[in-house]
Every structure is written in structure tokens, then in C-alpha cells.
Image: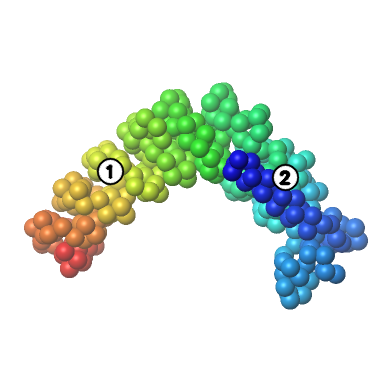
């Protein structure tokens, strides 16, 4: 019963919002130009929304025509303007055009399209509609680029079914681009995924997938796979080692003092050693003192020595 009441309340709010923002003459452009509208400045909802702001300074609302036109053009500036100002404009006929932007070559178009679609009441989340189609694209589309874009879109929708779909993609998709996008999406969804999906991504053979999984791990509340992150301090790829230490630092993973101290002393890359010294200072564990003292005296890189000295002051 509570769910039913919540549904009707959401529907009533949507209808009230749409009714308040009725079409009025265009905010700019020539006579009859249907580019944008504002609440009626003569008193039909304007004061309740904007108070004493002059009508020519109020934010305009995109019209359905402008949303459809911008989506068809694919021009990023037009797309962003139309969709941002159309956040609360219900336009069922616009959904098809905007949903095509989920697979646009421009990443910003894909992002704003998902942002606009997830705010819809109609045409996106029903059976066979956009969200379900996006899951099917990730699961079965023959084009790996479209599968990667679908994974990214699921991350922006913030819904539970996307977690399972992206987790499965991380585990089984043959294309590294798809696994990378799916790992990033799990970070956006704030979930490690069932069956240790993100941990699986951390062990991926592809460095890009591991970097995406590390980025996701840094975003997730109470991430449980810190031991897998610590293991990447020995990865063959410099960027992966450095990013793993950055994540351990950001998460204040004090149980990782030993591998981070080893990296601070032994890594061949000065950037990795410097990042490790900073992390040891964050951990504040006095057992790292001998390591940092040795680095301060012997490391060939001045920046690494400086960070070792700063870390010692933090212990």
C-alpha cells in the first residue's frame, strides 16, 4: 500500500509540475520560435517559482520541439542546453531521440542523455523501454563499443538491475573496453557487484580494466577488497602500481603499511615511491619510521626524499 501511495504521489507531483510550466511566448528568438518557455509571468505559477526575479532573468525551459531538435542534431552545446533546461519537461515523444544519444560518439552527449532519461516518469523504465533495452544491449549487442556505451549508461541510471548486468560484463565480456566501462559503472553505482565482480576486475589481464576497477574501488562506500588493491602495488604496469597506492592512501588502508613501505623503498619509478611515502604519512604508523629514514638518506630523487621527510613529521 505504501508503494502505491508513493507512486500516486510521484505521479501527482509530476502532473502538477507539468501543469505549472505551461507554454508561453518564447523567451528569446523571433516571433513564434518554440525554443524555450518560462512559467507565465502574468502570475500563473511564476511568482511561486521565481519570487521577485524579473521575468527576463528567469531560467527558461526547453520546449519538446527544442529537445527533439537538439537530440537530432547531436551538437553537444545544443544537446546540453536543451536537456539541462528540459530536466522537468515531460516529453514522451522526445525519449526515442534522446535515448539514441546513449550511443553517441561524444561522451558528454552520452552522459547528459542518461541524466535526462533517468528523470523521466514515462517511456524509460517500463517493460521493453529504454532501460531494459540498455541492459539487453550490454548483454548481447555484437558491437563491443555499443556494449561499452550501454554499461556506462547503466552506471548513470543508478538502478539495481544495472549492478547485476555490469557485474556480469566485468566477469565474462571478451572486450576490454566493455569490462572497463562496466567496472567504472560499478563505481558509479556504489557497489562491488555480486560474486566479487570488482575484485575480478582488479585481477584482469588488461591494465585499463584494473585502473577502472581501482577508480571504482575508491568511490565505493566500505569497499571490502583492499587486499586485492594492495596486491597491485607489485603490478607490472607503473600506472597501476601508482594508482593502487593512491587508492590505499585515499581509503586510509593502514593494514597495507607493509606493501606500501616496500614500494616506497624498492619501486623503480620515482612517482610510485613518492606516492608510497605520502601514503605512509597518511597511515601514521610508526613502524614505517625506519623505512622513511632510509629513503630520506638514500633515495636518488629529491621529491621522494621531501615526501619521506613530510611523512616522518606525520607519524
Q: In the image, what residue occupies the spot 74% across and 48% down?
A: 90
Q: Is residue 114 left or right of residue 202?
A: right
Name the element at disc 1. Answer: helix
Q: Callout 1: few (<14), some (14-19), or many (20+) C-alpha neighbours within 10 Å?
A: some
Q: Callout 2: few (<14), some (14-19), or many (20+) C-alpha neighbours within 10 Å?
A: many
Label ID, residue 71: 2
Label ID, residue 65: none
Name the element at disc 2. Answer: helix
From the top left corner, tell me how far across and down residue 110 is, in percent.
60, 44
Q: Closer to us: mark 1 or mark 2? A: 1
Q: Quadrant of residue 197?
A: top left
Can you name the residue that lies furthest to the right here?
A: 31
Q: Is residue 13 left or right of residue 270?
A: right
Q: Is residue 134 visible?
A: yes
Please state which of residues 142 and 186 is positioned toward the viewer in this rendering.
186
From the top left corner, tell me how far across and down residue 144 is, in percent.
53, 29
Dot 1 corresponds to which residue?
226
From the top left corner, tell me how far across and down residue 200 is, in percent.
35, 32
Q: In the image, what residue occupies the spot 47% across and 36% down?
A: 163
**Residue 169 position (above or below residue 280):** above
The alpha-carbon separation of the residues under discs 1 and 2 comes to: 42 Å
Amino acid at each position: 500500500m505504501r508503494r502505491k501511495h508513493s507512486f500516486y504521489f510521484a505521479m501527482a507531483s509530476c502532473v502538477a509540475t507539468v501543469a505549472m510550466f505551461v507554454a508561453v511566448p518564447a523567451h528569446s528568438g523571433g516571433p513564434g520560435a518554440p525554443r524555450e518557455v518560462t512559467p507565465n509571468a502574468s502570475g500563473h505559477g511564476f511568482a511561486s517559482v521565481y519570487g521577485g526575479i524579473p521575468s527576463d532573468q528567469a531560467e527558461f525551459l526547453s520546449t519538446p520541439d527544442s529537445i527533439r531538435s537538439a537530440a537530432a542534431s547531436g551538437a553537444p552545446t545544443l544537446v546540453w542546453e536543451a536537456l539541462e533546461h528540459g530536466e522537468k519537461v515531460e516529453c514522451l515523444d522526445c525519449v526515442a531521440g534522446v535515448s539514441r544519444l546513449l550511443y553517441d560518439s561524444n561522451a558528454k552527449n552520452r552522459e547528459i542523455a542518461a541524466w535526462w532519461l533517468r528523470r523521466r516518469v514515462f517511456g524509460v523504465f517500463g517493460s521493453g523501454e529504454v532501460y531494459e533495452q540498455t541492459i539487453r544491449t550490454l548483454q548481447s549487442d555484437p558491437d563491443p563499443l555499443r556494449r561499452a556505451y550501454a554499461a556506462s549508461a547503466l552506471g548513470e541510471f543508478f538502478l539495481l538491475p544495472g549492478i547485476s548486468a555490469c557485474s556480469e560484463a566485468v566477469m565474462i565480456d571478451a572486450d576490454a573496453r566493455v569490462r572497463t566501462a562496466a567496472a567504472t559503472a560499478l563505481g558509479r553505482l556504489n557497489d562491488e557487484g555480486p560474486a566479487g565482480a570488482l575484485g575480478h576486475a582488479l585481477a584482469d589481464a588488461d591494465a585499463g580494466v584494473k585502473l577502472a576497477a581501482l577508480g571504482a574501488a575508491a568511490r565505493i562506500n566500505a569497499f571490502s577488497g583492499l587486499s586485492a588493491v594492495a596486491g597491485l602495488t607489485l603490478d607490472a604496469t607503473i600506472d597501476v602500481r601508482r594508482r593502487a597506492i593512491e587508492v590505499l592512501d585515499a581509503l586510509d588502508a593502514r593494514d597495507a603499511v607493509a606493501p606500501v613501505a616496500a614500494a616506497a623503498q624498492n619501486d623503480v619509478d620515482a612517482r610510485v615511491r613518492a606516492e608510497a611515502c605520502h601514503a605512509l604519512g597518511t597511515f601514521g604508523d610508526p613502524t614505517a619510521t625506519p623505512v622513511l629514514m632510509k629513503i630520506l638518506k638514500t633515495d636518488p630523487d629529491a621529491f621522494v626524499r621531501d615526501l619521506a621527510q613530510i611523512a616522518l613529521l606525520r607519524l
